[in-house]
Image (spheres, coloured by chain):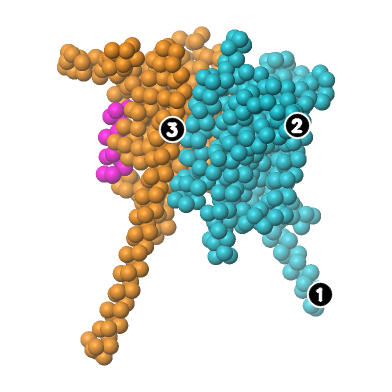
Chain colours: A orange, B cyan
């Protein structure tokens, strides 16, 4: 077997995919929540940066992993709430608001980094904590599966559990139903007494919550420090992953795996002196095609529904008219 | 007075937003600098205190103007195009590839390279445009994907086929001199591309405000349903806006290569497409105002760099200010209570005046 193939079919490679996938899956779920609510959040990049930063800082200064978790999540949720405030209260366009928030997060984290550490690059001078890796008792001893699925950072397991959590939340709870209702037709939702702004606020805060876990994983699991701009575009890749996954939990998981797979391959290939650019391009190309196919299908359905309604109405009217003529309008 | 404020309300609001941004920058510098007065002076006046730095301001403004006008045309049609970055990158790569593999007399070569780059950018705009216009696919996501495709595609093209193997780092082969845009001031890198940027901003203005197609783009952006009932071909209008947008961004990237570096030397995306978004917002999607907005952003950037080098404040200060300015400009609710008060006052005044006339 060629060195490339043998490394791809190794358990170490499969392990790496899950590792690389984790900081994509969290923000992708975050994007999916916001998309389902009809207000796309493209500020996951900023949300993750803020969470990654505050997690590290709080863990370094308090020595408490729990407080770091809370701080990181609070930072992410606050960013989501801030975006909702700009969008819903200050009437800024949500895309502009998110672009501003991304910039704000990038600038502010470096700024605060400099204040706390005197360094503009990273927190390597601080003693910050990391989330533990865990071995799963029974799974660990199964030959191949154990090597792939056991021994990951706890947040990787949280990410995998976040997928069914997302499903239950969005499809089995009243909040999820409301979020989807608002996303599909805000006017209809409003007419049945749903407070649209409030639901959008919740959705964006949830989006920030999912994103914050991705950020925490980056700085306290994937590596053990915060460095400037460490999200490196993952918040945007998450938009691709959510789109490709159709904003559905299983779809988002699979598309995040694909992006994780391709990124891992790129790392392996780079060492073999083969141009990796074309392979790295593939998932984006696939996403673009998927986007087009989804859109075409949605439009076909829309047209079809329109046709049916037209026919239905016409026939119904004809039937009523006929009926009236026949009975003389008496019955 | 009230009349004046109402007429220029958006402009006044923009200026106030910029002022608030400036005030925040002063406060932040005071908070963190050991020598605030010196730092503030460096930030605000640094760029004009030396010829080289002021030239930097103008050089950097050039691709920002191209991308700003590009984004503005798309925004005017209400198309959330963030694909200027990708169009710029791929056009510069393809244009470079074309320039190094052809030989022509100088003026013709320059023109042909610009045509190739512009056409590449146009294709990059066409794809999200047609997907949106025909099938309603999100142009935001599509243009984002096009950015990545452009990035990896451009890198592949340059690194695998047009790489200068003697250079020691990843750059393309040097452009033949026939494809250079001349630099006109010794000691600086000011080049003809800047003039082109301004010319294209004027052309963009003329197109948007004095041609039928421009009118159709603005109408579609203001009210798509109205435009449709008015008999406009929405598909054509949206695609045209995106194609022109991609073309301008592509020209911005190519002139940068032809005027400054004379070779493709980007391994990271240079970010001018995102700057274009900022500049379009500050310039209110008006091509002529965008010239000033680009100059302003570029001035702040150079000020930030000076701050980083000469004082003890990180240049990321500029990012924070940018974000505040953008929020305040795009937030329609910002100062709206004030506007409403003035509107009521003005209405009352007119009413009183009318009454006194009728009596």
Question: Is B358 located above or below residue B122 in the figure?
Answer: below
User: In which quadrant of the rendered image does the C terminus of chain B lie?
Assistant: bottom right
The numbered mark, 1 or 2, whose residue comes first in the sequence reads 2
Magenta-drawn stretch, dominant element (helix, strand or loop): helix
Corner quadrant of residue A300: bottom left
Q: Determine the chain carrying the residue at label 3.
A: A
Residue A245 placed where, x, y %?
Answer: 35, 37
Question: Residue at left 34%, top 17%?
Answer: A16
The answer to whether the residues at label 1 and label 2 have Cβ atoms under 8 Å apart is: no
Residue B107 has which mark? 2
Q: Is residue A172 magenta?
A: yes
Q: CA distance from mark 3 to mark 2?
A: 38 Å
Q: Which residue is mark 1?
A: B357
Task: Assess disc 3: are there few (<14), some (14-19) or many (≥20) residues with their C-alpha within 10 Å of its C-alpha.
Answer: many
Q: Which of the 4 image quadrants contains residue A200? A: top left
Query: Which subunit holds the residue at mark 1?
Result: B
Residue A83 visible in the picture: no
Pointer 1 and pointer 3 on the same chain: no
User: Residue drawn at (43%, 34%), measured in percent from left and top?
Assistant: A285
Split into 4 quadrants, where in the image is the N terminus of chain B? bottom right
Q: Secondary structure at mark 2?
A: helix
Q: Which mark is residue A284?
A: 3
Above or below — where is A108 with respect to B207? above
* SS of the residue under disc 3: helix
Q: Report the front residue among A169 and B358.
A: A169
Residue at image point 37% right, 35% down: A29
Chain that bears disc 2: B
Question: Which stretch did the figure color magenta?
Answer: A159-173
Q: Nearer the viewer, residue A24 or B251?
A: B251
Q: Nearer the viewer, mark 1 or mark 2?
A: 2
**Mark in front: 3 vs 2:** 2
Q: Position of residue A152 (x, y in %)?
A: 30, 17
């Amino acid at each position: 077997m060629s060195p490339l193939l043998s490394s791809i079919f190794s358990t170490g490679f499969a392990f790496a995919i899950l590792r690389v996938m984790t900081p994509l899956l969290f923000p992708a779920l975050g994007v999916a929540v916001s998309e389902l609510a009809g207000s796309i959040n493209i500020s996951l990049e900023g949300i993750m940066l803020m969470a990654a930063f505050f997690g590290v800082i709080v863990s370094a200064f308090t020595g408490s992993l729990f407080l770091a978790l809370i701080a990181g999540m609070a930072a992410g949720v606050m960013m989501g709430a801030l975006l909702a405030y700009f969008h819903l209260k200050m009437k800024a366009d949500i895309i502009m608001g998110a672009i501003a928030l991304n910039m704000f997060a990038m600038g502010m984290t470096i700024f605060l980094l400099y204040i706390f550490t005197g360094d503009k690059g990273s927190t390597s001078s601080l003693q910050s904590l990391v989330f533990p890796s865990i071995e799963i008792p029974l799974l660990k001893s199964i030959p191949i599966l154990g090597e792939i699925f056991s021994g990951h950072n706890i947040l990787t397991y949280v990410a995998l559990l976040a997928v069914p959590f997302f499903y239950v939340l969005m499809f089995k709870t009243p909040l999820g139903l409301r979020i989807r209702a608002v996303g599909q037709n805000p006017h209809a939702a409003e007419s049945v007494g749903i407070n649209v702004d409030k639901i959008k606020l919740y959705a964006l805060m949830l989006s920030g919550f999912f994103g914050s876990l991705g950020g925490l994983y980056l700085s306290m699991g994937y590596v053990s420090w915060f460095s400037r701009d460490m999200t490196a575009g993952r918040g945007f890749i998450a938009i691709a992953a959510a789109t490709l996954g159709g904003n559905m939990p299983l779809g988002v998981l699979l598309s995040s795996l694909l992006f994780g797979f391709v990124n891992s391959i790129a790392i392996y290939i780079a060492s073999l002196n083969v141009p990796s650019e074309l392979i790295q391009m593939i998932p984006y190309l696939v996403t673009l095609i998927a986007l087009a196919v989804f859109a075409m299908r949605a439009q076909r359905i829309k047209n079809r529904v329109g046709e049916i309604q037209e026919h239905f109405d016409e026939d119904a009217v004809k039937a009523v008219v006929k009926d009236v003529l026949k009975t003389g309008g008496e019955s | 007075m009230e009349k004046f404020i109402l007429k220029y309300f958006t402009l006044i609001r923009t200026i106030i937003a910029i002022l608030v941004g400036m005030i925040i920058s002063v406060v932040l510098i005071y908070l963190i600098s050991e020598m605030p007065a010196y730092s503030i002076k460096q930030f605000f006046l640094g760029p004009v205190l030396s010829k080289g730095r002021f030239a930097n301001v103008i050089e950097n403004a050039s691709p920002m103007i191209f991308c700003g006008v590009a984004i503005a045309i798309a925004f005017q049609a209400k198309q959330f195009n963030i694909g200027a970055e990708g169009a710029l990158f791929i056009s510069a790569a393809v244009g470079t590839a074309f320039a190094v593999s052809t030989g022509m007399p100088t003026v013709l070569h320059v023109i042909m390279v610009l045509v190739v780059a512009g056409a590449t950018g146009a294709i990059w705009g066409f794809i999200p445009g047609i997907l949106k216009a025909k099938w309603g696919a999100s142009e935001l996501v599509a243009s984002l994907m096009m950015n990545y495709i452009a990035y990896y595609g451009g890198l592949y093209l340059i690194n695998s086929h047009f790489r200068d193997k003697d250079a020691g780092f990843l750059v393309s082969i040097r452009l033949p001199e026939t494809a250079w845009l001349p630099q006109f001031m010794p000691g600086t890198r000011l080049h003809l591309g800047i003039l082109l940027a301004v010319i294209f901003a004027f052309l963009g203005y003329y197109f948007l405000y004095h041609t039928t197609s421009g009118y159709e783009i603005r109408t579609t952006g203001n009210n798509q349903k109205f435009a449709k009932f008015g008999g406009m071909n929405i598909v054509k209008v949206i695609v045209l806006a995106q194609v022109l947008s991609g073309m301008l961004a592509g020209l911005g990237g190519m002139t940068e290569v032809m005027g400054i570096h004379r070779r493709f030397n980007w391994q990271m995306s240079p970010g001018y497409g995102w700057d274009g978004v900022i500049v379009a917002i500050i310039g209110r999607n008006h091509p002529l105002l965008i010239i000033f907005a680009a100059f302003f952003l570029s001035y702040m950037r150079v000020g930030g760099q000076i701050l980083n080098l000469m004082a003890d404040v990180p240049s990321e200060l500029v990012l924070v200010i940018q974000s505040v300015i953008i929020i305040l400009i795009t937030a329609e609710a910002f100062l709206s209570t004030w506007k409403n008060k003035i509107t009521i006052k003005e209405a009352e005044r007119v009413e009183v005046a009318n009454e006194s006339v009728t009596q």
